[in-house]
Image (cartoon, grey):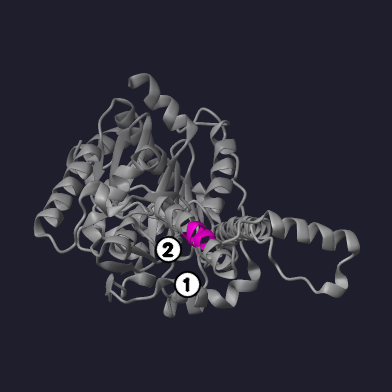
Amino acid sequence: MDNKQFIADVAKKANRPVDDINNLVIGITECFRESCLAGNSVAVPGFGSFTPLKNDEQIVTDHTTGKKLLLPPEITLTFRSSSVLRKKITPAQ
Amino acid sequence: MNNIMPLPALSASVATAVNCTEQEAEELIRIFFSSLSETLAQGHNVKIKGLGSFTVIDDDVRFMPDTGLADAVNLPFAAFEAVELPDDFDMESSMNIVNNGDPDTTDETTPTSGALESLSEAEEAIDTQHDLSGNQDIPMPVAIEATDVDTTTETESHNAETAPELSTDTPSDYDNIPYSDTTLNESPTQESRSNPRWFIAAAAIACILCFGAGYFLGHTIGASAPDREIAPSRLTLSQDRQLQATESALPASSTESDSTKMYESITNEVAQQIQSEKSTATITDTIGRTRFLTTMSRQHYGRMEFWVYIYEENASKLGNPNNLSAGTIVIIPPAEKYGIDANNPASVAKAVQRGKEIYAQFN
Protein backbone atom coordinates (compact mmCIF):
# COMPACT_ATOMS: atom_id res chain seq x y z
CA MET A 1 0.00 0.00 0.00
CA ASP A 2 1.50 3.30 -0.99
CA ASN A 3 1.56 6.52 0.98
CA LYS A 4 -1.37 8.21 -0.73
CA GLN A 5 -3.67 5.27 -0.28
CA PHE A 6 -2.78 4.80 3.36
CA ILE A 7 -3.18 8.49 4.23
CA ALA A 8 -6.58 8.51 2.57
CA ASP A 9 -7.59 5.46 4.55
CA VAL A 10 -6.54 7.05 7.84
CA ALA A 11 -8.26 10.31 6.97
CA LYS A 12 -11.46 8.45 6.30
CA LYS A 13 -11.32 6.60 9.62
CA ALA A 14 -10.44 9.73 11.58
CA ASN A 15 -12.98 11.83 9.72
CA ARG A 16 -10.33 14.40 9.06
CA PRO A 17 -8.99 16.05 5.94
CA VAL A 18 -5.98 14.51 4.26
CA ASP A 19 -3.86 17.57 5.05
CA ASP A 20 -4.32 16.97 8.76
CA ILE A 21 -3.12 13.43 8.42
CA ASN A 22 -0.10 14.59 6.41
CA ASN A 23 0.65 17.10 9.15
CA LEU A 24 0.23 14.27 11.61
CA VAL A 25 2.90 12.25 9.83
CA ILE A 26 5.19 15.28 9.77
CA GLY A 27 4.65 15.79 13.49
CA ILE A 28 5.35 12.15 14.24
CA THR A 29 8.49 12.23 12.12
CA GLU A 30 9.71 15.39 13.78
CA CYS A 31 9.06 13.88 17.18
CA PHE A 32 11.03 10.79 16.23
CA ARG A 33 13.90 12.92 15.03
CA GLU A 34 14.09 15.02 18.19
CA SER A 35 13.72 12.04 20.43
CA CYS A 36 16.40 10.03 18.66
CA LEU A 37 18.85 12.92 18.70
CA ALA A 38 18.35 13.06 22.45
CA GLY A 39 18.97 9.33 22.66
CA ASN A 40 15.42 8.52 23.68
CA SER A 41 13.03 5.94 22.33
CA VAL A 42 9.44 6.43 21.25
CA ALA A 43 6.96 3.79 22.34
CA VAL A 44 3.58 3.45 20.68
CA PRO A 45 1.31 1.24 22.76
CA GLY A 46 0.05 -1.76 20.87
CA PHE A 47 2.36 -1.15 17.93
CA GLY A 48 6.01 -1.06 18.93
CA SER A 49 8.92 1.11 19.86
CA PHE A 50 11.31 3.13 17.78
CA THR A 51 14.81 3.21 19.22
CA PRO A 52 18.01 4.85 18.03
CA LEU A 53 20.89 2.41 17.90
CA LYS A 54 24.49 3.34 17.46
CA ASN A 55 26.74 1.11 15.38
CA ASP A 56 30.44 1.56 16.11
CA GLU A 57 33.00 2.08 13.40
CA GLN A 58 34.40 -1.07 11.91
CA ILE A 59 36.79 -2.32 9.31
CA VAL A 60 35.54 -4.54 6.55
CA THR A 61 37.59 -6.26 3.88
CA ASP A 62 36.50 -7.01 0.37
CA HIS A 63 37.84 -10.45 -0.50
CA THR A 64 37.60 -9.87 -4.21
CA THR A 65 39.77 -6.76 -4.19
CA GLY A 66 41.54 -7.17 -0.87
CA LYS A 67 40.80 -3.56 0.02
CA LYS A 68 40.08 -2.56 3.57
CA LEU A 69 37.39 0.00 4.30
CA LEU A 70 36.91 1.90 7.55
CA LEU A 71 33.18 2.42 8.00
CA PRO A 72 32.30 5.35 10.29
CA PRO A 73 29.94 5.01 13.24
CA GLU A 74 26.31 5.69 12.58
CA ILE A 75 23.02 5.97 14.39
CA THR A 76 20.12 4.06 12.92
CA LEU A 77 16.48 4.13 13.85
CA THR A 78 15.37 0.62 14.70
CA PHE A 79 11.90 -0.66 15.27
CA ARG A 80 10.75 -3.43 17.54
CA SER A 81 7.18 -4.61 17.11
CA SER A 82 5.04 -5.27 20.12
CA SER A 83 3.49 -8.61 20.97
CA VAL A 84 0.05 -7.20 20.17
CA LEU A 85 1.12 -6.38 16.65
CA ARG A 86 2.81 -9.74 16.18
CA LYS A 87 -0.30 -11.53 17.31
CA LYS A 88 -2.31 -9.62 14.74
CA ILE A 89 0.11 -10.51 11.98
CA THR A 90 0.60 -14.17 12.74
CA PRO A 91 -2.91 -15.46 11.97
CA ALA A 92 -2.84 -13.68 8.62
CA GLN A 93 0.28 -15.54 7.45
CA MET B 1 18.66 10.16 27.65
CA ASN B 2 17.87 6.47 27.11
CA ASN B 3 14.32 7.22 28.14
CA ILE B 4 11.09 6.16 26.54
CA MET B 5 8.86 8.90 25.24
CA PRO B 6 5.34 7.96 26.28
CA LEU B 7 2.24 8.49 24.21
CA PRO B 8 1.13 11.68 25.98
CA ALA B 9 4.48 13.30 25.22
CA LEU B 10 4.18 12.22 21.62
CA SER B 11 0.66 13.61 21.51
CA ALA B 12 1.84 16.93 22.86
CA SER B 13 4.41 17.20 20.11
CA VAL B 14 1.95 16.22 17.41
CA ALA B 15 -0.79 18.55 18.68
CA THR B 16 1.37 21.50 17.78
CA ALA B 17 1.90 20.23 14.25
CA VAL B 18 -1.73 19.35 13.64
CA ASN B 19 -3.07 22.42 15.46
CA CYS B 20 -5.41 20.54 17.73
CA THR B 21 -5.68 19.62 21.38
CA GLU B 22 -3.51 16.94 22.93
CA GLN B 23 -6.46 14.63 23.35
CA GLU B 24 -7.39 14.94 19.71
CA ALA B 25 -3.76 14.40 18.74
CA GLU B 26 -3.61 11.29 20.89
CA GLU B 27 -6.76 9.97 19.26
CA LEU B 28 -5.32 10.66 15.82
CA ILE B 29 -2.13 8.82 16.70
CA ARG B 30 -4.12 5.83 17.91
CA ILE B 31 -6.14 5.73 14.70
CA PHE B 32 -3.02 6.15 12.62
CA PHE B 33 -1.14 3.25 14.12
CA SER B 34 -4.28 1.16 14.43
CA SER B 35 -4.82 1.49 10.68
CA LEU B 36 -1.21 0.68 10.13
CA SER B 37 -1.51 -2.46 12.26
CA GLU B 38 -4.62 -3.61 10.43
CA THR B 39 -3.01 -3.05 7.05
CA LEU B 40 0.06 -5.00 8.08
CA ALA B 41 -2.10 -7.74 9.56
CA GLN B 42 -3.75 -8.13 6.14
CA GLY B 43 -0.33 -8.91 4.71
CA HIS B 44 0.20 -5.56 2.97
CA ASN B 45 3.41 -3.61 3.23
CA VAL B 46 3.02 0.08 3.92
CA LYS B 47 5.19 2.93 2.79
CA ILE B 48 4.69 6.27 4.51
CA LYS B 49 6.37 9.24 2.98
CA GLY B 50 8.65 10.99 5.43
CA LEU B 51 8.48 8.19 7.99
CA GLY B 52 9.51 4.99 6.27
CA SER B 53 8.30 1.64 5.08
CA PHE B 54 6.89 -1.20 7.12
CA THR B 55 7.32 -4.69 5.71
CA VAL B 56 5.93 -7.94 7.02
CA ILE B 57 8.63 -10.60 7.09
CA ASP B 58 8.41 -13.93 8.93
CA ASP B 59 5.57 -12.97 11.26
CA ASP B 60 7.33 -9.78 12.20
CA VAL B 61 7.41 -6.23 10.98
CA ARG B 62 10.59 -4.71 9.61
CA PHE B 63 10.93 -0.96 9.50
CA MET B 64 13.14 0.94 7.09
CA PRO B 65 13.23 4.67 7.86
CA ASP B 66 12.88 7.16 5.10
CA THR B 67 16.08 8.71 3.79
CA GLY B 68 15.38 12.09 5.31
CA LEU B 69 14.55 10.65 8.70
CA ALA B 70 17.57 8.35 8.64
CA ASP B 71 19.87 11.25 7.80
CA ALA B 72 18.31 13.37 10.52
CA VAL B 73 18.80 10.65 13.12
CA ASN B 74 22.41 10.13 11.98
CA LEU B 75 23.15 13.86 12.07
CA PRO B 76 26.00 13.59 14.62
CA PHE B 77 27.94 11.33 12.24
CA ALA B 78 26.73 12.76 8.96
CA ALA B 79 30.09 14.36 8.21
CA PHE B 80 31.92 11.03 8.19
CA GLU B 81 32.16 8.61 5.34
CA ALA B 82 33.85 5.34 4.57
CA VAL B 83 37.60 5.57 4.11
CA GLU B 84 39.75 3.14 2.18
CA LEU B 85 42.68 1.97 4.26
CA PRO B 86 46.15 1.37 2.83
CA ASP B 87 47.31 -2.19 2.31
CA ASP B 88 49.99 -1.89 4.97
CA PHE B 89 47.57 -0.67 7.59
CA ASP B 90 48.28 -2.47 10.85
CA MET B 91 44.97 -3.22 12.47
CA GLU B 92 46.47 -4.96 15.48
CA SER B 93 48.49 -1.97 16.62
CA SER B 94 45.57 0.39 16.11
CA MET B 95 43.31 -1.88 18.08
CA ASN B 96 45.80 -1.92 20.97
CA ILE B 97 45.68 1.84 21.10
CA VAL B 98 41.96 2.53 21.04
CA ASN B 99 39.08 0.95 22.81
CA ASN B 100 37.79 -2.09 21.02
CA GLY B 101 34.06 -1.78 21.45
CA ASP B 102 34.15 -2.37 25.17
CA PRO B 103 30.58 -1.97 26.38
CA ASP B 104 31.81 0.04 29.34
CA THR B 105 33.11 2.78 27.13
CA THR B 106 30.28 2.85 24.63
CA ASP B 107 28.77 6.21 23.91
CA GLU B 108 25.84 6.62 26.24
CA THR B 109 23.97 9.17 24.19
CA THR B 110 22.17 6.36 22.45
CA PRO B 111 21.14 3.06 23.94
CA THR B 112 22.91 -0.11 22.91
CA SER B 113 21.31 -3.43 22.21
CA GLY B 114 21.26 -4.15 25.95
CA ALA B 115 19.15 -1.11 26.56
CA LEU B 116 16.94 -2.16 23.69
CA GLU B 117 16.10 -5.34 25.57
CA SER B 118 15.20 -3.50 28.75
CA LEU B 119 13.01 -1.10 26.82
CA SER B 120 11.24 -3.94 25.06
CA GLU B 121 10.47 -5.61 28.39
CA ALA B 122 8.80 -2.46 29.67
CA GLU B 123 6.90 -2.10 26.46
CA GLU B 124 5.69 -5.69 26.62
CA ALA B 125 4.25 -4.99 30.04
CA ILE B 126 2.39 -2.01 28.62
CA ASP B 127 1.06 -3.93 25.62
CA THR B 128 -0.46 -6.70 27.66
CA GLN B 129 -2.78 -4.22 29.30
CA HIS B 130 -4.28 -2.56 26.30
CA ASP B 131 -4.45 -2.20 22.55
CA LEU B 132 -5.04 0.67 20.22
CA SER B 133 -8.79 0.12 20.06
CA GLY B 134 -8.99 2.14 23.26
CA ASN B 135 -11.15 -0.38 25.10
CA GLN B 136 -9.01 -0.13 28.19
CA ASP B 137 -7.38 2.70 29.97
CA ILE B 138 -3.79 3.14 29.07
CA PRO B 139 -1.54 3.54 32.07
CA MET B 140 1.07 6.24 32.04
CA PRO B 141 4.31 4.58 31.00
CA VAL B 142 7.15 5.05 33.38
CA ALA B 143 10.39 6.45 32.09
CA ILE B 144 12.97 3.77 32.19
CA GLU B 145 16.70 4.33 32.31
CA ALA B 146 18.98 1.78 30.78
CA THR B 147 20.83 -0.11 33.48
CA ASP B 148 23.96 -0.78 31.51
CA VAL B 149 24.97 2.82 30.94
CA ASP B 150 28.32 3.75 32.34
CA THR B 151 27.97 7.15 33.98
CA THR B 152 31.69 7.57 34.27
CA THR B 153 31.93 7.97 30.53
CA GLU B 154 29.46 10.80 30.32
CA THR B 155 32.15 13.31 29.50
CA GLU B 156 33.56 10.99 26.88
CA SER B 157 30.30 10.99 24.99
CA HIS B 158 30.84 14.50 23.67
CA ASN B 159 34.34 13.66 22.60
CA ALA B 160 33.07 10.53 20.90
CA GLU B 161 30.76 12.58 18.71
CA THR B 162 33.39 15.07 17.59
CA ALA B 163 36.44 12.84 17.50
CA PRO B 164 35.43 9.34 16.52
CA GLU B 165 37.55 6.42 17.53
CA LEU B 166 39.84 4.67 15.14
CA SER B 167 39.07 1.33 13.64
CA THR B 168 37.54 -1.39 15.70
CA ASP B 169 36.52 -4.68 14.32
CA THR B 170 33.01 -4.93 15.64
CA PRO B 171 30.49 -7.31 14.04
CA SER B 172 28.47 -6.07 11.14
CA ASP B 173 26.06 -7.34 8.60
CA TYR B 174 26.95 -5.73 5.30
CA ASP B 175 25.69 -8.08 2.62
CA ASN B 176 27.32 -6.34 -0.33
CA ILE B 177 30.87 -6.55 0.89
CA PRO B 178 32.00 -10.13 1.56
CA TYR B 179 34.40 -10.42 4.41
CA SER B 180 35.64 -13.25 6.49
CA ASP B 181 35.03 -12.48 10.10
CA THR B 182 31.51 -11.18 10.20
CA THR B 183 30.53 -13.03 13.30
CA LEU B 184 33.18 -12.00 15.67
CA ASN B 185 31.41 -13.47 18.57
CA GLU B 186 34.47 -13.66 20.61
CA SER B 187 35.30 -10.64 22.63
CA PRO B 188 38.82 -9.29 22.37
CA THR B 189 39.69 -10.74 25.77
CA GLN B 190 38.57 -14.20 24.68
CA GLU B 191 40.63 -14.06 21.53
CA SER B 192 43.65 -12.78 23.42
CA ARG B 193 43.25 -15.66 25.87
CA SER B 194 43.27 -18.22 23.07
CA ASN B 195 46.67 -17.04 21.76
CA PRO B 196 48.57 -17.80 25.00
CA ARG B 197 46.85 -21.18 25.17
CA TRP B 198 47.97 -22.00 21.68
CA PHE B 199 51.47 -20.83 22.45
CA ILE B 200 51.64 -22.86 25.67
CA ALA B 201 50.45 -25.99 23.87
CA ALA B 202 53.03 -25.53 21.13
CA ALA B 203 55.78 -24.95 23.67
CA ALA B 204 54.79 -28.10 25.58
CA ILE B 205 54.87 -30.20 22.42
CA ALA B 206 58.28 -28.80 21.48
CA CYS B 207 59.66 -29.59 24.94
CA ILE B 208 58.37 -33.16 24.78
CA LEU B 209 59.94 -33.67 21.36
CA CYS B 210 63.28 -32.26 22.51
CA PHE B 211 63.26 -34.40 25.62
CA GLY B 212 62.43 -37.50 23.64
CA ALA B 213 65.14 -36.84 21.09
CA GLY B 214 67.66 -36.11 23.78
CA TYR B 215 66.75 -39.22 25.71
CA PHE B 216 66.92 -41.38 22.61
CA LEU B 217 70.23 -39.87 21.61
CA GLY B 218 71.78 -40.20 25.04
CA HIS B 219 70.51 -43.72 25.52
CA THR B 220 71.77 -44.85 22.16
CA ILE B 221 75.19 -43.29 22.57
CA GLY B 222 75.56 -44.64 26.06
CA ALA B 223 74.68 -48.15 24.99
CA SER B 224 77.03 -48.15 22.05
CA ALA B 225 80.06 -46.58 23.66
CA PRO B 226 81.64 -49.28 25.67
CA ASP B 227 85.08 -47.68 25.28
CA ARG B 228 84.09 -44.55 27.06
CA GLU B 229 86.91 -43.37 29.12
CA ILE B 230 86.43 -43.30 32.83
CA ALA B 231 88.86 -41.93 35.28
CA PRO B 232 90.59 -44.95 36.71
CA SER B 233 90.44 -43.55 40.20
CA ARG B 234 86.68 -43.81 40.14
CA LEU B 235 86.51 -47.42 39.19
CA THR B 236 86.20 -50.07 41.76
CA LEU B 237 87.87 -53.38 41.30
CA SER B 238 84.72 -55.08 40.03
CA GLN B 239 84.02 -52.27 37.56
CA ASP B 240 87.53 -52.43 36.28
CA ARG B 241 87.20 -56.14 35.66
CA GLN B 242 83.89 -55.60 33.87
CA LEU B 243 85.47 -52.97 31.70
CA GLN B 244 88.32 -55.24 30.81
CA ALA B 245 85.86 -58.03 29.98
CA THR B 246 83.86 -55.72 27.75
CA GLU B 247 86.92 -54.49 25.96
CA SER B 248 88.03 -57.99 25.32
CA ALA B 249 84.66 -58.91 23.89
CA LEU B 250 84.91 -56.19 21.30
CA PRO B 251 86.19 -57.09 17.87
CA ALA B 252 89.75 -56.36 17.23
CA SER B 253 88.94 -53.62 14.75
CA SER B 254 86.92 -51.59 17.26
CA THR B 255 88.63 -48.24 17.48
CA GLU B 256 87.81 -44.71 18.41
CA SER B 257 86.96 -43.87 14.80
CA ASP B 258 84.28 -46.56 14.77
CA SER B 259 82.56 -45.06 17.79
CA THR B 260 82.76 -41.66 16.20
CA LYS B 261 81.20 -43.00 13.04
CA MET B 262 78.51 -44.73 15.06
CA TYR B 263 77.80 -41.50 16.87
CA GLU B 264 77.56 -39.65 13.61
CA SER B 265 75.27 -42.26 12.14
CA ILE B 266 73.01 -42.07 15.14
CA THR B 267 72.83 -38.29 15.01
CA ASN B 268 72.14 -38.45 11.32
CA GLU B 269 69.34 -40.91 11.91
CA VAL B 270 67.82 -38.69 14.55
CA ALA B 271 68.17 -35.63 12.37
CA GLN B 272 66.51 -37.42 9.47
CA GLN B 273 63.72 -38.56 11.74
CA ILE B 274 63.12 -35.03 12.95
CA GLN B 275 63.22 -33.72 9.41
CA SER B 276 60.68 -36.28 8.27
CA GLU B 277 58.45 -35.35 11.16
CA LYS B 278 58.67 -31.72 10.16
CA SER B 279 57.82 -32.47 6.57
CA THR B 280 54.76 -34.50 7.52
CA ALA B 281 53.70 -32.11 10.29
CA THR B 282 50.40 -30.38 9.66
CA ILE B 283 50.59 -26.62 9.29
CA THR B 284 47.71 -24.81 10.91
CA ASP B 285 46.65 -21.23 11.27
CA THR B 286 43.98 -19.38 13.14
CA ILE B 287 41.38 -17.00 11.75
CA GLY B 288 41.46 -13.74 13.62
CA ARG B 289 40.29 -10.16 13.44
CA THR B 290 43.27 -9.28 11.29
CA ARG B 291 43.94 -12.66 9.76
CA PHE B 292 41.65 -13.85 7.00
CA LEU B 293 41.94 -16.68 4.55
CA THR B 294 43.41 -14.27 2.03
CA THR B 295 46.02 -13.18 4.54
CA MET B 296 47.06 -16.77 5.15
CA SER B 297 47.09 -17.50 1.43
CA ARG B 298 49.33 -14.54 0.75
CA GLN B 299 51.74 -15.66 3.46
CA HIS B 300 51.89 -19.37 2.68
CA TYR B 301 51.41 -19.40 -1.08
CA GLY B 302 52.45 -15.96 -2.21
CA ARG B 303 49.06 -14.83 -3.54
CA MET B 304 45.72 -14.25 -1.87
CA GLU B 305 43.76 -15.95 -4.65
CA PHE B 306 44.70 -19.36 -3.30
CA TRP B 307 42.50 -18.87 -0.24
CA VAL B 308 40.04 -21.18 -1.95
CA TYR B 309 42.25 -24.18 -1.29
CA ILE B 310 42.54 -23.36 2.38
CA TYR B 311 38.77 -23.13 2.41
CA GLU B 312 38.37 -26.47 0.59
CA GLU B 313 40.72 -28.15 3.03
CA ASN B 314 38.56 -26.96 5.91
CA ALA B 315 35.17 -26.68 4.24
CA SER B 316 33.47 -28.99 6.71
CA LYS B 317 34.00 -26.62 9.61
CA LEU B 318 33.96 -23.26 7.82
CA GLY B 319 30.68 -23.23 5.98
CA ASN B 320 29.90 -19.91 4.38
CA PRO B 321 33.21 -18.15 3.57
CA ASN B 322 31.51 -14.82 4.25
CA ASN B 323 30.61 -15.92 7.75
CA LEU B 324 33.78 -17.16 9.41
CA SER B 325 34.33 -17.06 13.12
CA ALA B 326 37.46 -15.65 14.70
CA GLY B 327 39.47 -18.29 16.54
CA THR B 328 38.75 -21.02 14.02
CA ILE B 329 41.86 -23.12 13.43
CA VAL B 330 42.31 -24.10 9.81
CA ILE B 331 44.73 -26.51 8.17
CA ILE B 332 47.05 -25.07 5.55
CA PRO B 333 47.38 -27.72 2.86
CA PRO B 334 50.71 -28.24 1.10
CA ALA B 335 51.00 -26.43 -2.18
CA GLU B 336 51.60 -29.66 -4.07
CA LYS B 337 48.23 -31.05 -3.08
CA TYR B 338 46.26 -28.53 -5.13
CA GLY B 339 48.91 -27.60 -7.65
CA ILE B 340 49.39 -24.15 -6.17
CA ASP B 341 51.96 -22.08 -7.98
CA ALA B 342 52.02 -18.33 -7.54
CA ASN B 343 54.18 -17.91 -10.62
CA ASN B 344 51.79 -19.83 -12.86
CA PRO B 345 48.98 -17.67 -14.31
CA ALA B 346 46.91 -20.77 -15.05
CA SER B 347 47.06 -21.82 -11.42
CA VAL B 348 45.98 -18.35 -10.31
CA ALA B 349 43.13 -18.27 -12.82
CA LYS B 350 41.96 -21.65 -11.66
CA ALA B 351 41.89 -20.46 -8.08
CA VAL B 352 39.90 -17.35 -9.04
CA GLN B 353 37.35 -19.47 -10.88
CA ARG B 354 37.08 -21.80 -7.93
CA GLY B 355 36.47 -18.83 -5.67
CA LYS B 356 33.54 -17.73 -7.82
CA GLU B 357 32.09 -21.22 -7.64
CA ILE B 358 32.35 -21.26 -3.88
CA TYR B 359 30.63 -17.89 -3.52
CA ALA B 360 27.91 -19.01 -5.91
CA GLN B 361 27.03 -21.84 -3.57
CA PHE B 362 26.13 -19.41 -0.82
CA ASN B 363 24.59 -16.56 -2.80
Mark 1–mark 2 CB contact (< 8 Å)? yes
- Kind of residue at disc 1: Met
Give the chain of mark 2: B
Please identify the quarter of the rendering in which residue B121 is found: top right
The boundaries of the magenta stretch are B265-271
Hey, which quadrant is residue B304 in on the image? bottom left
Q: Nearer the viewer, residue B66 or B322?
A: B322
Task: Name the residue rendered at 54%, 31% in the picture.
Answer: B130
Q: Main secondary structure of the magenta part?
A: helix
Q: Quadrant of the C terminus of chain B?
A: top left
User: SS for tag 2?
Assistant: loop
Question: Mark 2: which amino acid?
Answer: Asp
Q: Is residue B242 above or below residue B76?
A: above
- Would you name the residue on which mark 1 appears? B95
A25 inside magenta stretch: no
Q: Circle 1 marks a residue in which chain?
A: B
Q: Nearer the viewer, residue A72 or A54?
A: A72
> Dot 1: few (<14), some (14–19), or many (≥20) neighbours within 10 Å?
some
Q: Position of residue B345 (x, y in %)?
A: 10, 59
Residue A89, placed above or below residue B143: above
For label 2, the crowd category at 10 Å Cα-Cα, with few meaning under 14, some 14 to 19 and many 20 or more, is many
Q: Do the residues indicated by labels 1 and 2 lie within the same chain of the protein?
A: yes
Q: Give the residue at mark 2.
A: B169
The location of residue B175, given as percent across then percent down, is 27, 50
Percent across and percent down for residue B134 are: 48, 31
Q: Find the residue positioned furthest to the top.
A: A91
Q: Name which residue lies at 44% across and 56% down.
A: B278
Q: Quadrant of the N terminus of chain B?
A: bottom right
Looking at marks 1 and 2 on the same chain, the residue that comes earlier in the sequence is marked by 1
The total of numbered circles placed on residues is: 2
Residue B183's x, y, as percent? Answer: 42, 50
Compared with residue B50, is residue B121 higher up or lower down, i.e. above or below? above
